[in-house]
Image (tube, rainbow, N blue to C red):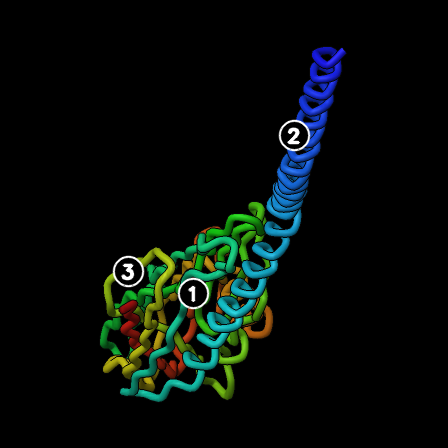
Amino acid sequence: MRNSFCVSCISGDVMGTIGKTNRMDDKAVSPIIAIMLILAILVTSISVLASNWFPIVKKRAEIQHNKELIDKFLSTVTVYSTLNENRSSAMSIKLGGGDTFFSQTTTSSTLSVNQSGWININMVCDGTPLLLTLKLFKVSLSTHNTLIPDQTFVFSEGGIRIFQYGKNITRLEPDIDKSNGFREGILYLIADNLTSEPQEVSGNGIVFLRFKSNLNPNSGLYKNCTGRILVEDGVFNGKWEDVMVKLETNNPTVFSFNQNTNTLQILTQINVSLTIRDFEVQIQ
């Protein structure tokens, strides 16, 4: 009986110890499971944010930078129109942006200056030939985004056009039709002439766009002129056509316009007031 009693006691002690151990294991496992559940929730939440909210924040940042970039580029019109003779003016443009706390990837842009066309003047005034070829120019800004559509903005002769999805619209009309015309027997012709070389800069840094204007020495009033003026403008050719068609329509005995060659013929002797603005445009 004594041995049986002792065995029973030992069995009870062992079972009690096992029970305590199981309860201790349960207590140790419970926090681990809780941590794993919290981590799973965090991973799921981050995944949802990364696939939904982060792109929205990034897109908003790109839209904001794009707006600031466009507003800055539009100010080239003010710089161009207020630039006096023999003066220069510069403006800074930040090509890249749109980065956020969650994404350091920035957009980029390309800024370029190129010839956009030409004006060929072939006249005889007071028996003296006048042969000039002027280079029209354009300043282009092409945006390269990740979440919003790319666009190209083109400035030329005081106007701006926007190119997107293969289409283009005129954001700001140039003053070609207002500055050129026939008044009181004088043909007024105002034109730009690019004297610097084409340039292009791409990236996401800050660049400086500098304009310098000088009055071309061939500017002046020419008397008793006949001849022809040819215009090829890759940006605002339609505006030049409107001017020349109007000249022919209102003065059919003085002018003849050939739309196939974009050439205005001066049929009778008239005076011509020629204003040529030489432009040096640099990207630094």
Picture disc at residue 120: none
Read off the residue under disc 2. 21
Three-letter code for the amino acid on which mark 1 is drawn: Gln
Which quadrant would the C terminus be assigned to in this image?
bottom left
Q: Is residue 244 above or below residue 24?
A: below
Image coordinates for residue 254, horizontal then vertical, percent: 48, 73
Three-letter code for the amino acid on which mark 2 is drawn: Thr
- Please rate how many residues cluster around mark 3, counting C-alpha atoms within 10 Å: few if below 14, some from 14 to 19, many from 20: some
State how far apart marks 1 and 2 are (Cα).
Answer: 109 Å
Rendered residue at 30%/81% (across/down):
213
State how far apart marks 3 and 1 are (Cα).
Answer: 35 Å
Dot 3 or dot 1: first in sequence order is 3
Read off the residue under disc 1. 265
Foreground residue, 49 or 152?
Answer: 49
Residue 176 visible in rendering: no
Q: Is residue 97 left or right of residue 87?
A: right
Q: Is residue 117 left or right of residue 39?
A: left
Image coordinates for residue 157, horizontal then vertical, percent: 44, 71
State how far apart marks 3 and 2 are (Cα).
Answer: 80 Å
Picture disc at residue 199: 3
Dot 3 or dot 2: first in sequence order is 2
Whether tag 3 and tag 1 are in contact, CB under 8 A, the answer is: no
Label 2: which secondary element: helix
Q: Is residue 243 above or below residue 1?
A: below
Image coordinates for residue 3, horizontal then vertical, percent: 70, 12
Foreground residue, 47 or 243?
Answer: 47
Label 1: which secondary element: strand
Three-letter code for the amino acid on which mark 3 is drawn: Gln
Rendered residue at 50%/51% (across/down):
145
